[in-house]
Amino acid sequence: MTRLMMLVIALISAAAPALAQQDGPEARARFGPADGPAMVLRSTTDIAVLGPTLMDFTARNPGIAVNYEQWGSNALYKISQRDCEAGHSRADAVLSSAVHQMVDLVNRGCAGSYRSPASTALPAARRWRDQLWGVTQEPAVIIYNTHLVPPQDVPHTRFALLDLMRRAEARYQGKIATYEIEASGLGYLFAFEDSLEASTFGALMEGFSRAGAVATCCSAEIIKGVSKGEYAIAYNVLGSYVNARRDPNVGVVWPQDYTLILSRGYMIPKSAEQVDSAQKLLDFLLSARGQEDLRAAGLLVSGEPEDSATPASALHTIAISPVLLVALDRQKRAQFIARWRAAFGR
Amino acid sequence: MARSAAIEGATASLKRRVIIGVLALLLVGGAVAALAAFGYGRAAARESYDRLLLGAANDIAEAISIQNGAPVVDLPVAAFQLLALAPDDRIYYSVRGPGGEVLTGATGALPNPTPTDSPSFFDASMADERARFVTLSRRFAERSFSGTVSVTVGQTLRARTEMALGLTRDALIAAAIGGIALLAAAVWVIERAMRPLRHIADQLAGRDPHDLTPMDAAVPAEVAVMVGAMNRFMARLDRQVAAMRNLISDTAHQLRTPVAALRVQAELASAEEDDARRDLILTRLQRRTRSLGELLDQMLSRALVIHRTDAARRVSLDLRDVALDVIESRDHELVAPNRDVVLEIGEAAVMVMADTLSLSEALRNLLGNALKHGAGRVRVGASREGTRACLWVEDSGPGPSAAVLERIGERFEKTAASVGQSAGLGLSIARAVAQAFGGELLLGATAQGFRATISLPAQEEQI
């Protein structure tokens, strides 16, 4: 297992973050038997996070090998769409955090249907048409550098963050980060959900603008930045990645007004070849064992938030439903990004 | 008991027949109801989901505004929340400008490129799946932009099908419950209606074998027919049994005396030593034996007649044929070879509903009486008198005395019988036959002599 991890790490290091914007996987890894056919899983999840779960899966299903490809969400959306139009999918399963893109793929008729006791047991908000399933539950959190942000300044709600940014203290100027929504499908989804969820979003944009907030790419970079002290506070970061890294300098806040919960969408393309393996993987991910693995990886929070001050009723799961199609609408997106750019002064 | 013993030839039980009938009805009705309910459900689903579709399209159309001389859609989430009420259906939407250029939403050819009116609904396919679409247009006439923007929204049919099937299922469940109730009611009603039959069966089973009185008929009209028939059958049986009993007792009573006399005569003859006296006794013995034979003949013939009049089918017959047959058989020539017997019949047929054999027997007896007890020429005839059809025998003598006439026609005229004469018996046969066919026996003197007439209701000539 350790040796395999080494291989994985080697592969990750081979794929530099600079490649992120290009059309192609950011990293690859293989789980299970080294020879023979393997199912292809394309995912936006970092290999290091999902790796142990997949290793457990291949250990329990000796005949199955998994070729894992890590993609950026927008690139994954594009390649999946292309595969769908071509009628031949290289991927046997797609697992993306940008669920609105997954909903769009399903809406275009790109997905195959599957029903099993485990899949039908999912709550309605975490499955659609028996073609898309939300296998994880991860919160969108505010993280901060514990050295740079004094305890009294730690924002426990969006209003607190807003107040902090309005104070326009020099200490936070240019030190607040969030996703670059044009580059990250997930960042866009969180921002869009925010815009639907509360009227504070306009004020938040204005606050970002005033505080000279930085929009940058990718959970890993943002967390690293906060950890190093490059940023003091980061908004709408995927909490699961923070947990996975266990960085001592990083504090995590589940916003108490509401915390968005993301459920990564798992889809089996209609033209997939190894449908059987893909279905087995889904059932494993939804099984008690698989859920335990995901919980160990930080990809699955139970109903109780870690920050006990956040009431359970404040957890808003991003429902997997056709309503997410609005987020992908060309004009809507253009308008939204225009607003965003205006806020970040680009 | 007898109740549970299956009767041979009994066909399927009523209950089973009704159950099969009701089930067949339910199956056919259920199929028809399912089709109708599905048709109705589909129409209802189409109507309700078309409204959702139209509502969403309207929402989107409302969200179009003109910015910098170009139409811009701020796609409303509400429209999609509306469409998501059909939770498992895929969504199509496309907003096109005046020249057909895509403003937002799906690119590519519209599923229905030439909508005729606004809004217009149509069926088409959405990526290999059947779907329903609506297109509506919104006109803009502004300084910076003028033209029509069309909004097309579509949705696959899962929710509609599910709703139609759900309505069908509900209708079928209701029909099934109704059907079961109907079945139960039918079984209950039959059970109740058939209970009198059980009662009748119990009554019959518990009845004394000699009890042929009618059964009380507190039964439904349909069953009463059977009980009535059974009662009539028992009455007939009763009559026959009675006749049989009479015959046996009469015969025993009737034969005892002559047979005793015969024995005495025979003993006398065997004890007599004088030849001349023995011859005399033997002659008497011979006469007695013959008259006993006649008596037996008549008694049997009477039994036969009584049996037939109850049992034989009545047919339409001509009394002249009966008279003719009796004369032509020439039996009377054996009894009285020297007597003159004349047939008197007319041209017209004398029709009655009766049994030929019984009437012949009656006539033969009357003729025998006339030959034996009457005098002179004997005439036999059949004639129509008003509404009566008459079959008669007439001799030229004065007839029996008034006292005899009074007693005559009883079943047994004992005095006559005890001496081996059977005129009474013959008359009683004739009377029984006449009564059996709804008529009577008339005896009386005429200008020519004494006439015995069997008078029956005449059957009208066939129209």
Image: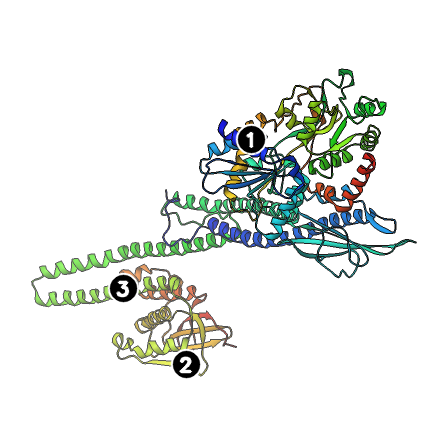
Q: Position of residue B159 (x, y in %)?
A: 65, 46
Tag 2 secondary structure? strand
Q: Which residue is mark 3?
A: B295
Disc 2 residue crowd, few under 14, some 14–19, many 20+, Cα 10 Å? some
Label 2: chain letter = B
Q: CA distance from mark 2 to mark 3?
A: 30 Å
User: Relative to B369, is A286 above or below?
Assistant: above
Q: CA distance from mark 3 to mark 1?
A: 137 Å
Q: Position of residue A203 (x, y in %)?
A: 83, 30
**Residue B457 tag number:** none
Circle 3: residue type? Leu
Tag 1 secondary structure? helix
The answer to which image quadrant residue A25 occupies is top right
Residue B425 or residue B304, whichever sits in front? B304
Circle 2: residue type? Ile
Label 1: chain letter = A
Residue B463 or residue B168, whichever sits in front? B168
Q: Which residue is mark 1?
A: A9
Asked if badge 2 and badge 3 are on a common chain, one would say yes
Residue B13 or residue B295, whichever sits in front? B13
